[in-house]
Amino acid sequence: MVAGCSRTSDEEGAGQAVSRELSAIVATCAVARGPVETLRTANAYWEPFEAGATFRSGDWVRTGPDASTRIELRGGGRIELEERTVVRVERPSAPAGGGSVVALESGTARGLLPEDAPPDGPLVLRGDNGRQVALTVEAHAGPAEFRVTRTPRGMHLSVSRGRLLLSEGAHRRTLEAGNWLDVARGLEDAEHDGPPFPTSLSPGVDARIAWSPELRIPLSWRPLEGARSYQVLVARDLGFTQRIVDAQVQGSDFTFVPPEPGMFVWRVAALDAEGRPSEPGFARRIFVERQRPRGLLVTPRDGYVAPAGSASEDLVFAWQSTGGAPRYRLVVARDRELRQPVLAREGSPQQVVLPGLAPGEYYWGVYVVEDPPVPLFQKARRLVVRGPSRDLARDALLPMAP
């Protein structure tokens, strides 16, 4: 009997130890490319890591040249470290709350916060002198994509998509897409948002384009009032060290001629009347492939089941770009072959927000509007909607919002 009690006690102790180990994890590595290393709090040396590695409070992470890593954060959200970037991941301290703290020592990190992130905030940025700025996403505003860059003068936080809600103690700010703010000294000393930077328009995010010797890729961005000209950079890496194009143009477009298949990255900065560059716009990748790309659907994922009671809420459908300025057709149907459509929308955006679908099982896919239509998928994705909702007209063909 004593031995049995001892075993039970040992098992409980082991379980508690495992629970403590799991709760100590503040982030995990999802993707690692090139030379990436971590400095553990208990070690005095850097060691390489691979996808699947875990990080605890106080661990450092750094990327070398031509390297990057994507880190999934405790509580939701992720950051991707570009090359030559150093960060420290920590637990948040009161009263900031949140799931993970990221202290950017140098370089650039790009991040994404999901719409369904916990209300106390999955991410806190630590600036100078221990200042902590918590990032959250406005309810029903969709996910937010952002970038944090260390400069000799501060730490720039900029938003490419969505809207970030920033908080530090009693201070609150909202940062819209296309703007940036220096958060190194917190929100109390941040008087104004930084001037807007050029917003890239086309090709879309992570565009995949079929290669041909005659390929010409038009790059375009939204013009800024007061900009004298624009600086266009195209490189083979996110750090823009392997540049192919470094040109100044007067208008808001540029034609890029890829020398061969591969991955290319581009961004644009505005030059003022004195030739000073603005904060650069967000880098976009272009994948030039030898075969016409397929499988470009992004969200909802295959087999997605909408939570009970959410049938009356909007659904967001998104897909990757094929480059150029094509028209797309989103089809939502009752069958896998998409031959029984309940709704179709046609236009040029890569994202469509639909009102609540009636409860049931659906399949969806996207086509490039050509003759014949070109599917951007290998198989249609399944979607299940639960709960009461207003029904949509069968075979409705509606225009996309511009």
Image: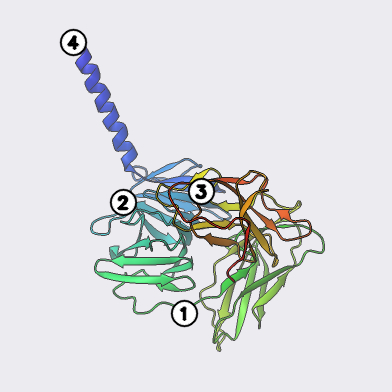
Q: Amino acid at mark 3?
A: Val
At label 2, the amino acid type is Arg
Residue 280, placed above or below residue 298:
below
Query: From mark 1 to mark 3, how far is it between C-alphas?
Result: 34 Å
- How crowded is the residue under tag 4: few (<14 C-alpha within 10 Å), some, or many (20+)? few
Could you tell me which residue is drawn at 57 percent across and 53 percent down? 298
Residue 15, placed above or below residue 268: above
Q: Is residue 326 left or right of residue 105?
A: right
Specify which label sits upstream in the sequence, 3 or 2.
3
Q: Nearer the viewer, mark 1 or mark 2?
A: 1
Residue behind mark 2: 91
Measured in 3D between alpha carbons, the distance from the residue under mark 4 to the one under mark 2, in whole angstroms, is 43 Å
User: Distance between the Cα atoms at labels 4 and 3?
Assistant: 52 Å
Residue underneath mark 3 = 36
Q: Nearer the viewer, mark 3 or mark 2?
A: 2
Q: CA distance from mark 3 to mark 2?
A: 22 Å
